Image (spheres, grey):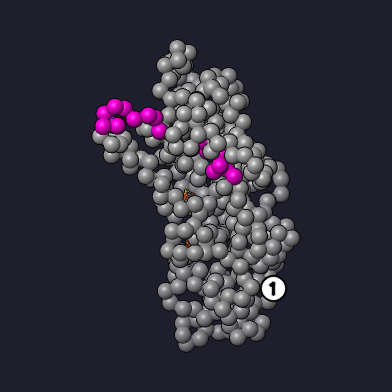
Amino acid sequence: MTDAPIHDDGATGTAAPDEADGGEVTMVLWRGDATGGAFTEYVLPAVEGEVVLDVIHRVQATHAPDLACRWNCKAGKCGSCSAEINGKPALMCMTRMSELPEGEDVVVAPLKTFPVIRDLVTDVSYNYEVAKRIPPFNPRAKTEDEVEAGGYRMAQIDVERSQEFRKCIECFLCQDVCHVIRDHEENKTSFAGPRFFARSAELEMHPLDVTDRRAILQKEQGLGKCNITKCCTEVCPEHIKITDNAIIPLKERVVDAQYDPVAWLGRKIRRRTKGTVEQAAATSPATGPAAVQPEDHPPAHGIPTALELDEVDEVDELDELDDGPMVSVAAEPTGAPMGQAGDTPPEAPSPADG
Ligand code: SF4
Ligand code: SF4
Ligand code: FES
């Protein structure tokens, strides 16, 4: 449902014909809060060279000073201005008006996967709760040679492998598009999401890190729920190959731990190259176990406040997991879409639906 369009002069009614300045643009923006809302049309003069965020700012300046939107850098680097533009998760500051279908309304809605605070602003704290549960970087002790040389030595290829994931601006567009949590609120307690698989991959592939995260990825972070649809990769504004370079290698590592007979034998005779999460965290010079198990943190989105590491204390537990397929296909959506009540933003077209 949309309200009557509001024109640049504040009047409501049918859009005026094109002006000599090149025409008009109709912005259809979701307005409301956690209790519900609706789409409202705003008709403005078209201005060459603008991005969607520019037009949102003009709506604020000329029509709706109380319109809420989050932004900061206007350069695609802070990750604040994420929204769903014509049904596709994107940064408002990096989406040129000229790239959108000419003459058609521009529909801007808040991220569907997260609860609305107001208008285009959502509560993304789910992601920060998940981030706290990622076992932190835990480098091995320096060798004598490295102590003498004054630091670790790493091959350039290893540096580059991690740096791809360090480009993440935490816009959470990948989290928004992933159907595992987009369509299943209940999965938020057991699924880390693509941004955090990329973070775990960065740490797992780091040649200095000594923590083994495979059991946690399998048991706590729901890696098996990802069915490699690649939607997260498609929306990433930093062009991080989340699926190919993070998720699939992580799945391979978990499968190796569970099914590879050589790896199995190695574990049995305790010839591991990485320690358990607890062992590594206890000896970490950087952070220690407190960073793995945050205390006194209020629960959010039903996520446990502390990672139950006691239950995941051995990578050998992977041997005890069910012999089911590592890549599981998520069940058909069963619940109502999460995020908003009342007149919710529209279902995104296929590119946005994981
Ligand atoms: S590949 Fe698909 S299912 Fe897997 S994390 Fe990305 S969006 Fe989610
Ligand atoms: S991985 Fe890409 S899409 Fe996901 S939060 Fe980082 S920058 Fe955004
Ligand atoms: S305003 Fe910073 S990414 Fe858009």
Task: For residue 67, say whether it is visible.
Answer: yes
Number of disc labels: 1
Residue 333 at what x, y percent from top left?
A: 67, 43
Q: Say which residue label 1 marks.
A: 3
The amino acid sitting under disc 1 is: Asp
Residue 139 at what x, y percent from top left?
A: 40, 33
Q: Quadrant of the N terminus?
A: bottom right
Q: State the image quarter where residue 311 is shown.
A: top right
Q: State the image quarter where residue 138 is shown.
A: top left
Task: For residue 226, say whether it is visible.
Answer: no
Residue 217 at what x, y percent from top left?
A: 53, 33
Residue at 43% x, 20% y is 272
Q: Nearer the viewer, residue 258 or 85?
A: 258
SS category of the residue bearing label 1: loop
Taking the view exactly as shown, the residue that stands out farthest to the bottom is 20
Residue 291 at what x, y percent from top left?
A: 53, 38
Q: In the rendered view, would you say 116 is above or below 189?
A: below
Q: Which residues are magenta?
A: 129-148
Q: In the rendered view, would you say 9 is above or below 158?
A: below
Q: Nearer the viewer, residue 324 or 319?
A: 319
Q: In the rendered view, would you say 52 is above or below 271?
A: below
Residue at 29% x, 27% y is 144
Residue at 57% x, 55% y is 349
Q: State the image quarter where residue 328 is shown.
A: top right
Q: In the rendered view, would you say 212 is above or below 121?
A: above
Left or right side of 34 for 245: left
Q: Is residue 141 magenta?
A: yes
Q: Nearer the viewer, residue 199 or 233?
A: 199
Taking the view exactly as shown, the residue that stands out farthest to the top is 269
